[in-house]
Image (cartoon, rainbow, N blue to C red):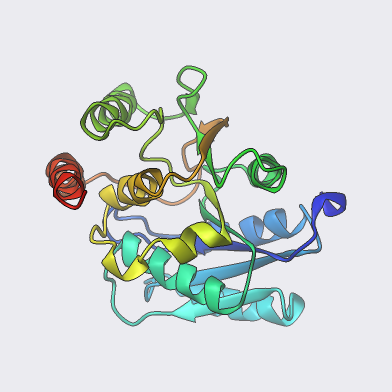
Amino acid sequence: MEKYYNNQVLEVIEILKEESKTYNEIENIDAIIRAVFSQSDLVHILIVDDNSPDLTALKVKELQEEFQDRLFLELRKLKSGLGTAYIHGFKWALKKRYDYIFEMDADFSHDPKDLIKLYECCDKGLADVAIGSRYITGVNVVNWPMNRVLISYIASIYVRIITGMKIHDTTAGFVCYKRNVLETLDLNKIKFIGYAFQIEMKFKAHIKNFNIVEVPVIFTDRTKGESKLSSGIISEAIFGVISMKIKSIFKK
């Protein structure tokens, strides 16, 4: 992977998602950090920890001694949602002048080896935003119950119909952004904090005419820890998408 890098790359990993009730990330954090760093010596990682209850941050601080100047930790005292955690990470990355900024889960549901695919897609000029897509070549999801697959898949169809985006996996959380995309979007105006955050980021990039490309990946549900999908997340996505589309029409 090193031969493709001209600039440093930031990998943003959001550790604790309040909305999805994801806990016990300490079981994954050591392994995921090492797996990401094994992709290239030029990768940097930012961990955004929303006061996780399992002392994940202490483990990260231990690893910072081993990966000095490559592993960074931002601690937030209050759990204010998935979206605000990523926005915090994006702003941090922009301030540090990184050129390619990734977001991914820290539980191996996103394969670190696929970072190369997303990076190459952007670096070779094929995309401004590269999405690790579960649905661009069918349904590539492992270990999810059928009802969860159907909710996610139907949600993406619903979003495509409402927004007009030609993206198959609108709720994907495995994404590479070129720096100028995040600079152009007004991150302070990103409203959603839960499931709909991923949709809003893609929609805002879409209406700014950035080139969004889906790269096929296989999503494997977490093998450690625990995750649940709440009704609040689903509600925000359903009604939030309609509101977002209406507002975009009146702004034209």
On the image, which quarter does residue 166 sit in?
A: top left
For residue 152, above or below residue 115 = above
For this view, does 32 lie left or right of residue 51? right
User: Does any portion of residue 105 appear in the rendered image?
Assistant: no
For this view, does 111 lie left or right of residue 237? right
Residue drawn at the location 68% of the way across and 55% of the way down: 36
For this view, does 37 lie left or right of residue 194? right
User: Does any portion of residue 35 appear in the rendered image?
Assistant: yes
As rendered, which of 201 and 75 lies closer to the eye? 201
As rendered, which of 87 and 225 lies closer to the eye? 87
Residue 182: give x, y in percent of width and height: 47, 62
As rendered, which of 248 and 201 lies closer to the eye? 248
Residue found at the very far front of the displayed protein: 252
Residue 152: give x, y in percent of width and height: 31, 31
Residue drawn at the location 54% of the way across and 72% of the way down: 94
As rendered, which of 208 and 45 lies closer to the eye? 208
Residue 236: give x, y in percent of width and height: 16, 48
